[in-house]
Amino acid sequence: MIANSNKKELNRQYFVWGMVLISVGFSFACSRMANSNGRSAVALNLLIFISCVFYIFKTRDKALACLLFSAMMFGVVELLADFLCVRSTRTLDYSMAHSALLLESPWWMPLSWALVALQVGTLGNRAIERFGFIRGALLTGVLGASLIPFYEEMAWGAHWWRYKNCLMLGHTPVYIIVAEFVIGAGLALWGHFTLRTECYRRAAQLGAMAGLVTVIGGLVGWGLVEFIGRGARPVWPP
């Protein structure tokens, strides 16, 4: 049983790293396409989502199925973080995607975030298993601060979204890099606990809590870099 469990975990890690490589390669290709917009983001999301569902059915990986369900809840709650970035800080602009909006985000954004969360959460769980809670979460925070800003950079070239009115590193806001460190650490803990439950109600609760971490991460990043560092002030929506 232990050997089978270890094999399943190893196969899951290989699959998730494959997802990461496909996401990176596809995003890079889209960033070089002059006619790319939200439709290419939908294509990427569907490719990864269908692959994930197929893998779950093929391997009967109940833990990953639970994590995917939880990640979908995460993606819905994350819309609150986008809302603040668009309407309050006025730093995030989705108009270039030419996609229908859900609140202030493209309709495909919850799925996009769900798939990224699944990747980071699975790898974060492995980091916690190997290095312990604190070091594992911190290492995953570094991964989040590296991987997700890469997607931010590719998103600008792919015409999925862009940032403005803030301190930038290339086309990525510095406050977003700080925020993604916080989010990455939170996703490690989320992945660790969610992969150990087969209760979908509990998974939904964990996903919602993890989604709120995106709001906290954004507030921490924007607060440190823009509010304290640069004296920026939020513009609250009416």
Image (cartoon, rainbow, N blue to C red):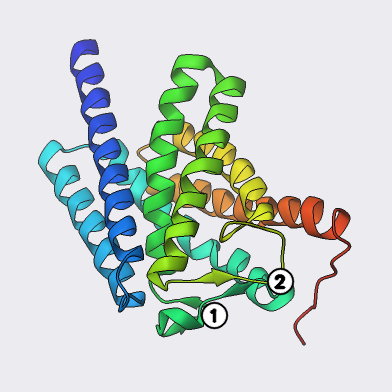
Residue density around tag 2, few if under 14, some if 14–19, many if 20 or more, within 10 Å: few
Q: Residue at x 44, y 64 (%)?
A: 155
Residue on which disc 2 sits: 165
**Residue 5 at what x, y percent from top left?**
24, 19
Q: Which structural element holds mark 2?
A: loop
Work out whether residue 73 can be spotted.
no
Q: Which mark is residue 103?
A: 1
Q: In the rendered view, tell whether residue 23 sits above or below residue 85.
A: above
Percent x, y for residue 98?
Answer: 41, 85
Q: Earlier in the sequence, mark 1 or mark 2?
A: 1
Secondary element under disc 1, as helix, strand or loop, is loop
Drawn side of residue 83 relative to residue 28, left or right = right
Task: Measure the alpha-carbon separation of dots 1 and 2.
Answer: 21 Å
Residue at image position (84%, 66%) is 232
Q: Is residue 83 left or right of residue 129?
A: right
Judge depth for marks 1 and 2 and give the one in front. 2
- Residue type at numbered disc 2: Asn
In the displayed structure, 22 sits above or below 104; it is: above
Left or right for 205, reference 217:
left
Quadrant of the frame with the N terminus:
top left
Q: Amino acid at mark 1?
A: Leu
Measured as percent of width and height from the top left, residue 188 is found at: 51, 35
In the image, 83 versus 2, the foreground residue is 83
Q: Position of residue 168 (x, y in %)?
A: 66, 59
Residue 230 shown left or right of residue 34 in the figure: right
> Any mark on residue 63, and which?
none
Q: Is residue 45 above or below residue 149?
A: below
Task: Verify CB contact (< 8 Å) between mark 1 and mark 2.
Answer: no
